[in-house]
Image: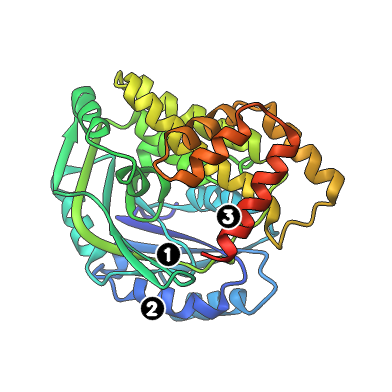
Amino acid sequence: MKKECIISTIIPIYNAEEYLYNTLNSLLVQHVHKENREILLIDDGSTDNSGKICDVYSKRYNFVETYHLKNCGVSNARNFGLYKASGKYIHFMDSDDILYPNMYQIFLEICSRHSPDVIVGGVERVDLKKNSKVYLGPSKNRNYKGKNGMSEFLESLDENDERWAFDYIWNKFFKRDFILSENIVFSKSITIGEDFEFNCKFFSKAKNVFTVNSIVYKYTIRNTGLVTAFHTDLWEIRDCLYKAHIRLYSLNNCLTKDKENEIRRYNGKLAFADLRSINNKRCTLNKKEKEMQIIGMINSNQYINILHYLKHDNKIKQRIFWLLLKNKNIRAIHFVIWLDKVYRKFN
């Protein structure tokens, strides 16, 4: 049996050779003794040189292990990593991001002092397309304990805070025993938003959360990933994520009417972006298939959320879209999709 270490870093990897060296090097400079760590590189059927790069690091460092899998997606790769991990805490990292040099030192000190179920830190989010940089994260160092503490934590979050709290998986350390005892895994049926669903399930059951007012992770949006592509099961996935979001607050007895409306707006905004993705150049559906997707959207619960978001948005453009969409007219929906495409082209 493998000796338990303090921290297991799990990195799912698929065709990331361009970024992998920088990612792994930012991980290796973290202040952790080699006996207290393990790095699990899960090569998810890469067709470039990513697998070979992983093998090089495994041969060079005895705490780095590489597993080559058939391509089955990021959720399967992370679940496999969880199965192989021996660390007291788990850190999920993406293969094209960078750690701040002091992340592990800060987090591991908190682990030893407070033994939280999860530690959450701040994020530097870089958008290459928009040439922008923003910082998202907790406003203070705080330990939230017990049922009342969890309710207080959730009630303190606004819509922007929920991004670092629930959208992101890699700005956190998760206690492995807690994950295993509560049987929290990544859903293989969800192809977008899998991080969000995992976080919602975890925070629904967590009893000890520690927030850190420090930027620990650099996340780069390259607009080349799955989230910018079109998915044929969008409405079912969004409905699942919406229900997970509602359930999180309901189980912690803090689902107020205002929070429910906020959740509806948040999910409606994402669902509207999904509707616009029919215009994405990577959408390979033909005209008939696109029509079926629009009909499916109209008949899903997410249409209600889309209307709620558009109606309560401050932008005049969104209010106009709401007026056009509220009667569920197919022609109006096509017009809104076209109008939005034109607006984005010239703005």
Disc 2, SS: helix
- The residue closer to the viewer here, 1 or 284, is 284
Position of residue 288 measured from the top left corner of the image (x, y, whole percent): 86, 44
**Which of pointers 2 and 1 indicates the residue nearer the eye?**
2
The residue lying at 57 percent from left, 47 percent from top is 273
Mark 1 in CB contact with mark 3 (< 8 angstroms): no
* Badge 2 or badge 1: first in the primary sequence: 2
Quarter of the figure with residue 18: bottom right
Distance CA(mark 2)–CA(mark 1): 12 Å
* Badge 3 or badge 2: first in the primary sequence: 2
- The residue closer to the viewer here, 281 or 245, is 281
Colour setting: rainbow
* Badge 1 or badge 3: first in the primary sequence: 1
Q: Amino acid at mark 3?
A: Val
Mark 2 in CB contact with mark 1 (< 8 angstroms): no
The residue lying at 49 percent from left, 67 percent from top is 95
Position of residue 158 measured from the top left corner of the image (x, y, whole percent): 29, 39
- The residue closer to the viewer here, 294 or 238, is 294
Distance CA(mark 3)–CA(mark 2): 26 Å
- The residue closer to the viewer here, 158 or 344, is 344
Disc 1, SS: strand
Note whether 153 is above or below 161 in the view shown.
Answer: above
Q: Amino acid at mark 2?
A: Asn
Q: Which residue is mark 2?
A: 25
Q: Which residue is mark 1?
A: 39
